[in-house]
Image (tube, rainbow, N blue to C red):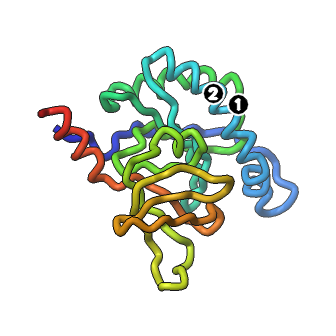
Amino acid sequence: MGRPALLFVYRKVVRPTRPRRRKGMNLFVANSNKKNTVDTVWQLAEPIAAELGLTLWDVRFVKEGATWILRVLIDRPDGVSIDDCEAMSRALDEPLDAADPIDCAYCLEVSSPGIERELTRPAHFAQMQGRSVRLHRIRPDSQNRREVQGTLRGLNGDEVCVTCADGTECAVPRKELASVTLADMDWNMQDEATED
């Protein structure tokens, strides 16, 4: 039995528009408050997730096309169900409305991180140490490679350190990476090991 790739619950939140002084003001306000929004939502969501027996994996506030999306990623050791996503979404409704950390219309998306979850926080790198990961570079390296796969050794300062299949050690600065994801074969290997 494998873990589901991705489950999510999606809800649109409409806020009354605020008067604009000039074109693009809402975009500027949303961009300038992105970190504050993520921090505020993290503080609201973490205890709620714990109450529901879940772990908060990540919170992201991103613009996709013309839509702002507040993405809350939850996890559980035995896997996340659609019921978990729905329960988290419903439990977040009231605290989000009360705190009102976002001053524009947005869509709330509560989901699992998926089997190829992205590692973004130092805690992710510590938790996934020893697992197989893919480093996706923004630009190709000197050998024209955009992707490096290996066993995660962890973070060393601002570098992601991996041991490649051929045994070579590789350290890539995080600013040169588009993303770091788990290689999905790990979940299959973990499931097979538990079945034996």
Q: Position of residue 133 (x, y in %)?
A: 41, 56
Q: CA distance from mark 2 to mark 1?
A: 6 Å
Q: How many marks?
A: 2
In the image, is residue 109 above or below residue 87?
below
Q: Residue 43, located in which quarter of the rendered image?
A: top right
As helix, strand or loop, the secondary structure at mark 1 comes to loop
Residue furthest to the right in view is 21
Question: In the current view of this chain or complex, which residue is farthest to the left?
Answer: 196
Which amino acid is tagged 2? Leu
* Residue 25, percent from left and from top: 80, 57
Left-right relation of 61 to 184: right
Q: Which residue is found at the position 53% from the left and 49% from the top? A: 154
Q: Residue at x 44, y 24 (%)?
A: 54
Q: Furthest residue to the front? A: 167
Q: Nearer the viewer, residue 4 or 180?
A: 180
Q: Is residue 163 above or below residue 34?
A: below
Dividing the picture into quadrants, the one containing residue 123 is top right
Classify mark 1: residues with Cα within 10 Å, few (<14), some (14-19) or many (20+). some
Residue 139 quadrant = bottom right
- Across and down, in percent, residue 3 comes to 26, 40
Q: Would you say the residues marked 2 and 1 are in contact, meaning their CB atoms lie under 8 Å apart? A: yes
Left or right relative to 190: residue 6: right
Q: Position of residue 150 (x, y in %)?
A: 40, 61
Amino acid type, label 1:
Asp
Q: Give the residue pinned by disc 2.
A: 96
Looking at the rendered structure, the secondary structure element under dot 2 is helix
84 vs 159, left or right, is left
Quarter that holds the N terminus? top left
Q: Quadrant of the C terminus?
A: top left
Question: Is 35 left, or right, of 110 in this rendering?
Answer: right
Q: Which mark is residue 195?
A: none
Q: Which residue is mark 1?
A: 100
